[in-house]
Amino acid sequence: MVRFVDRNTVLGIKYDDKYKKDWWKNTQKVLDKYNISFIEVPFFEDETDREHPESAIGVYVNYLEVNDLIVVPVFGRAEDAQAIEIIQKAFPNKQIETINYNDVAKEGGLLNCTTWVVK
């Protein structure tokens, strides 16, 4: 998952080697073609919860952005602080707030997914 910071920069999840090889090769081609910088944001999978195989826990870039506010999901892990720091640096003029969204994330969605407005 990636999110645009501006026309030339995206935030994206930092895949481990298990996923990165194929995904990164194709993504890098597109980023290079359009001269887009990629900022890695921590990512982890909660492999301890077998009841929720589609869990979105660990996906920090699934945040909510409204005007000058960004609400970032946090998961009670060490990676939380690093993710918040990276997102704040990418958006220095925005207010960053956090929310523990684990109960919703277990079902496969986070803030961006669950706040869509469809007419």
Image (cartoon, rainbow, N blue to C red):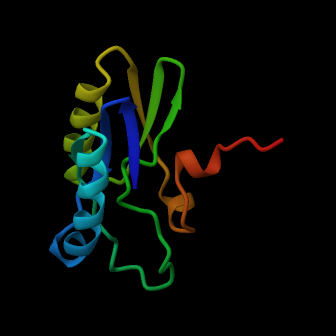
Residue 48 as seen in the image, left or right of residue 69 = left
Direction right: furthest residue:
119
**Is residue 99 shown above or below 88?**
below
Name the spot of residue 41 as percent of width and height, x first.
25, 48
In depth, the one of 72 and 92 nearer the eye is 92
Direction left: furthest residue:
17
Direction top: furthest residue:
93
Q: Quadrant of the N terminus?
A: bottom left
Which residue: 41% across, 43% down? 3
Name the spot of residue 85 as percent of width and height, x first.
22, 33
In depth, the one of 10 and 55 nearer the eye is 10
**Is residue 53 shown above or below 77?**
below
- Quadrant of the rendered image containing residue 87: top left
Which residue: 63% across, 50% down? 114
Q: Quadrant of the C terminus?
A: top right
Residue 102 as seen in the image, left or right of residue 17 = right
Which residue: 40% across, 20% down? 95
- Quadrant of the rendered image containing residue 21: bottom left
In depth, the one of 105 and 29 nearer the eye is 29
Direction bottom: furthest residue:
50
